[in-house]
Image (spheres, rainbow, N blue to C red):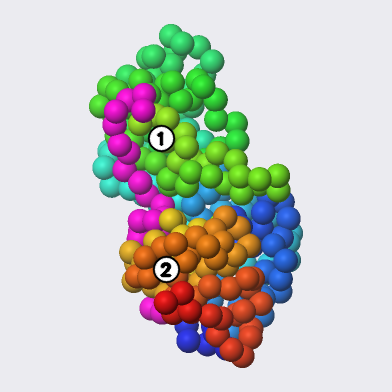
């Protein structure tokens, strides 16, 4: 079976295990079957929720996974900032609660913008950096305050650059869309912590001592490019953002190792079609 070639699986979540609140068909039972033998971890670019909240969601869907087996791009971003700043430095948190708690976990001091121009202007001076991740409640006030801080030369780390997020009703704006709007406003580019940089996958593999992981994702520009950057094999499942035509349109050396319709491929005796089928 496909998974037998690997010592662990590193899963993307949105579009692979769930879309919105609901499980992707066949994902939970396939992953649970594999996790009886090898370690399964999750590395998600979605920074809006804390690992324990993500863990509760996954367990509610029936997946056997511990909080310690979940790594978010907010954690990777906060670690990156901790390496640049003094302990307890103040950081403007833009995005969901996961951004704030990741900063706190590495000994930094998260601060939120308010709905007050004057207070936000002072705050932009006061903070040492901005950490920007996905959040459904991100407001104009958050973005304006971040723009002022960035324009004043403060460090700017984006948890990820995903332009879109899958929702049950179609694609919505991802963190990358809001990062791009701040780039337009400030003329500055952020440091990026999550996929497609290798850091998130490398940290995840190190956490469990895996030397031959299989990365599973639904996006070529984040999951598959991240796996390529980390030198890991990858499986693209067609249950989320990218489809077969997107794979075919790519340069052969930028494709995933495997492509499959869904995660039942993990348990099939025959490997799913490799990128070789596209020529
Ligand atoms: Mg995804």
Identify the disc placed on residue 195: none
Label 1: which secondary element = helix
Residue drawn at x 39%, y 56% is 196
Please indicate, yes or no, whether residue 105 appears anywhere in the rendered image: no
Query: Is 194 left, or right, of 100 in this rendering?
Result: left
Q: Is residue 188 magenta-colored?
A: yes
Q: Is residue 275 magenta-colored?
A: no
- Residue 268 picture quarter: bottom right
Q: Which residue is mark 1?
A: 180
Q: Which residues are magenta?
A: 184-213
Between residues 77 and 271, which one lies in front from this camera angle? 271
Q: Which numbered mark, 2 or 1, is in the foreground of this view?
A: 2
Is 177 situated above or below 277?
A: above
Residue drawn at x 54%, y 58% is 242
Dividing the image into 4 quarters, which one contains the C terminus? bottom left
Between residues 2 and 154, which one lies in front from this camera angle? 2
Query: Is 75 left, or right, of 229 in this rendering?
Result: right
- Residue 190 picture quarter: top left
Residue drawn at x 47%, y 37% is 177
Between residues 236 and 91, which one lies in front from this camera angle? 236
Mark pair 2, 1: CA separation: 25 Å
**x and y, in percent, of residue 257 in the image:** 44, 75
Identify the disc placed on residue 255: 2
């Amino acid at each position: 079976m496909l998974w037998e070639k690997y010592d662990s699986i590193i899963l993307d979540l949105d579009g692979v295990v769930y879309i919105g609140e609901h499980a992707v068909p066949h994902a939970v039972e396939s992953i649970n079957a594999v996790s009886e033998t090898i370690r399964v971890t999750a590395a998600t670019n979605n920074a809006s929720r804390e690992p324990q909240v993500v863990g509760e969601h996954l367990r509610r869907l029936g997946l056997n996974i511990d909080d310690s087996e979940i790594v978010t791009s907010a954690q990777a971003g906060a670690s990156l900032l901790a390496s640049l700043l003094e302990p307890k430095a103040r950081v403007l948190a833009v995005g969901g609660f996961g951004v704030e708690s990741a900063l706190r976990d590495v000994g930094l001091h998260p601060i939120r913008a308010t709905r007050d121009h004057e207070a936000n202007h002072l705050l932009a001076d006061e903070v040492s950096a901005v950490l920007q991740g996905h959040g459904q409640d991100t407001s104009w006030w958050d973005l304006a305050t971040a723009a002022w801080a960035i324009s004043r030369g403060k460090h700017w780390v984006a948890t990820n650059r995903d332009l879109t997020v899958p929702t049950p009703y179609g694609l919505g704006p991802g963190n990358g869309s809001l990062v791009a709007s701040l780039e337009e406003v400030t003329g500055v580019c952020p440091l990026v912590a999550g996929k497609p940089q290798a850091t998130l996958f490398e940290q995840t593999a190190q956490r469990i001592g895996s030397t031959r992981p299989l990365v599973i994702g639904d996006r070529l520009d984040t999951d598959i490019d991240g796996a390529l950057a980390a030198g890991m094999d990858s499986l693209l499942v067609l249950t989320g953002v990218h489809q077969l035509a997107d794979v075919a349109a790519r340069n052969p050396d930028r494709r995933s190792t495997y492509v499959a319709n869904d995660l039942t491929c993990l348990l099939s005796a025959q490997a799913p079609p490799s990128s070789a089928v596209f020529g």
